[in-house]
Amino acid sequence: MSPGTRLDRHDLASEKTARGDQSIAILFRRGTVNVAPLSRLNYKQALAWLYSLQRFGIKLGLENIRRLLDELGLENLRSARRHQNICSKVIHVAGTNGKGSVCAMIDSICRANGHRTGLFTSPHLVTFRERIRVNGKMISEDAVTGGLTTIRNLVADWDPHPTFFEVTTALALKHFAESKIDLVILETGLGGRLDATNAVQSNVSIITPIDFDHEEWLGNTLAEIAGEKAGIIKPGVPVVSAPQPPEAEKVIRSRAAEFSAPLQFVNECYNPSQGALRGQHQKQNAALAIAAMHTAKIHISERAIVNGLAATEWPARFQNWDERTIIDGAHNAGAARVLAQTWREVFDDQKATLVLAVLSDKDLRRICAAFAPIAESVLLPKIRSERAAAPEALGKVLSGMTPALPYSITSSIDDALALARAQPNPILITGSLHFAGEVLAHLRGEPAAFEECAQ
């Protein structure tokens, strides 16, 4: 029976599909669908099922995730008064750039103070398990498999079917509930107002710098984008925000006032004696993270702040792979500008051999404009992500913008790295988190993210 086949309400049908050790039996009777429990899959099969949900696309809305939390017995997460039996605090982070860094800092500082944390972020770089961490450790393959088997059985007959991100969010919250943690740190996936993470009641809302990205979903103006990000603001829940462009700040102030949510803009920087993440923007992120923890009344000592920031690990954020190679996942124009500024802070006037790959739905011109002034030459590898812009398209943008800047197209990441290493300049690998993840997997000799569930 093909997907979408309609049955008469009085029909009785049985369908069995076998794939390896999978066995699916569905009985339709008098309009009711009874789904027989599906056998437990192995890790790769479980991920293959999860990734198959991408066919449902992005579906913004909270109905499915609320239903899913209720069915999993996690309805208490939707109430601040009742989620104490799962965790004492929930921190919710939205914004365009810096969300992951702020989440990682909060997680590291809280762990340095002895708190047991649950961290949910996206996207992942190399392995899906990066998205869900308890006390700094990635979720195990066994927990992924067990959790996805449970959820798959639960939603088999749902219409509309939960999406990839809704199921991943539910998996994370289920894992946290089973792990006896003190606090949960949730990064939004897209926007905020209708993001699956917004079904959870938080103790503080954080908004990192807002810029242009995902305009097809969030709007074409900063005010529209800010409206989606500010959608995580809830009645009476305090808000801590980074400095914002005037249009975005106005929207945030209006939303906070509407919901009687105390609002603080953090304009200062925190200058740690030894911060693991480099760049002036990371000092701003650190100040934002610290202010949010204080606002949420999470006890942290100054020693925990210092030690936590020094121990923060967040790959592909101006990451030193070796003494002359930097990997950064800057994936939009705002992030590209910040990366170029950080490059100048670290390398002064020394220019980079730039290895660049960008997703096709990004603003190629503005990204190239940010990187061109710090590049001595550019290498444009063909990468394996289906979403990547063609190297020829990037080359056309570069040549039209800066004709004197030499560029070369390579057939693979390996070829690009070999050419880059033959040059005397420091190397900057950037343009996309997908690309950064593919490079890290290549350098580590591990499967790339999209290969993880290959049979």
Image: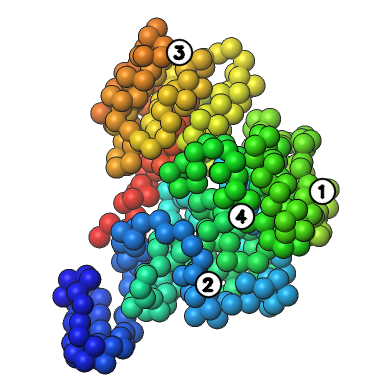
341 sits to left or right of 365: right
Marks 1 and 4: which is nearer the front?
Answer: 4
Q: Which residue is mark 3?
A: 376
Marks 2 and 3: which is nearer the front?
Answer: 2
Q: Earlier in the sequence, mark 2 or mark 3?
A: 2
- Residue type at mark 2: give it: Arg
Q: Which residue is mark 2?
A: 66
Residue sitting at 37 percent across and 50 percent down? 449
**Outermost residue toward the left?**
1
Helix, strand or loop at mark 1: helix
Marks 1 and 3: which is nearer the front?
Answer: 3
Q: Which residue is mark 4?
A: 231
* Residue 303: assigned label: 1
Screen quadrant of the C terminus: bottom left
Other-residue count near label 4 (Cα within 10 Å), few / some / many at <14 / 14–19 / ≥20: some
Is residue 134 something that shows in the picture? no
Q: CA distance from mark 1 to mark 3?
A: 42 Å
Residue sitting at 53 percent across and 78 percent down? 70
- Residue type at mark 1: give it: Arg
Q: Is residue 396 above or below residue 43?
A: above
Residue sitting at 48 percent across and 74 percent down? 68
Q: Earlier in the sequence, mark 1 or mark 4?
A: 4
Residue 251, quarter of the rendered image: top right
- Residue type at mark 3: give it: Glu
Q: Position of residue 88 (x, y in %)?
A: 72, 69
Helix, strand or loop at mark 3: strand
